[in-house]
Image: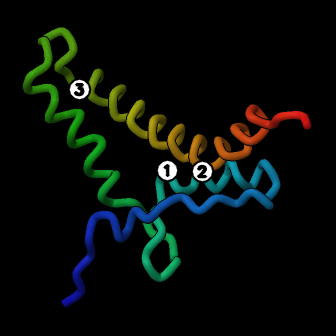
Amino acid sequence: MQRIEADAIGAQLRRGPDQPFRERVRHAVKLTFLARRPSGDYAPAYARYIAIPGSNFLSNTWRADSEANTQDALIRTGLGFVGKLSSNAVAEFWPDISARIHHRSK
């Protein structure tokens, strides 16, 4: 029997600082919807597909009636995926941006 841990599929975003800008953006987008397996292959991020919408629809149970509906839950779900994409982009590009910001002249 094969045991898969939640984080084993998620792995971390592997930066590609030597890649062209377009490829780096494409990689960040790709890892929003796919996850890298321990073998290095990519697979659909099923846990993410379940967790983001599931948590948003579940949160309808304690939200005010004015925002506890399907439309608002779908909006929050979309924002959850945008948040993941943003996180991937920051992980990919922040080290380069930070290096340029903190560059000091000698």
- Disc 3 is placed on an element classified as helix
Q: Which residue is mark 2?
A: 28
**Residue 52 placement: quadrant:** top left
Structural distance between the alpha carbons of marks 3 and 2? 28 Å
Structural crowding at the residue carrying mark 2, measured as other residues with C-alpha within 10 Å and reported as few (<14), some (14–19) or many (≥20) = many
**Residue 54 placement: quadrant:** top left
Looking at the image, the residue that sits furthest to the top is 66
Looking at the image, the residue that sits furthest to the front is 106
Q: Which residue is mark 1?
A: 32
Structural crowding at the residue carrying mark 1, measured as other residues with C-alpha within 10 Å and reported as few (<14), some (14–19) or many (≥20) = many
- Nearer the viewer's eye, disc 1 or disc 3? 1
Q: Which mark is residue 7?
A: none
- Disc 2 is placed on an element classified as helix
Structural distance between the alpha carbons of marks 1 and 2? 7 Å
Which residue type does callout 2 highlight?
Ala
Structural distance between the alpha carbons of marks 1 and 3? 23 Å
Q: Which residue is mark 3?
A: 70
**Residue 96 placement: quadrant:** top right
Q: Nearer the viewer, residue 25 or 71?
A: 25
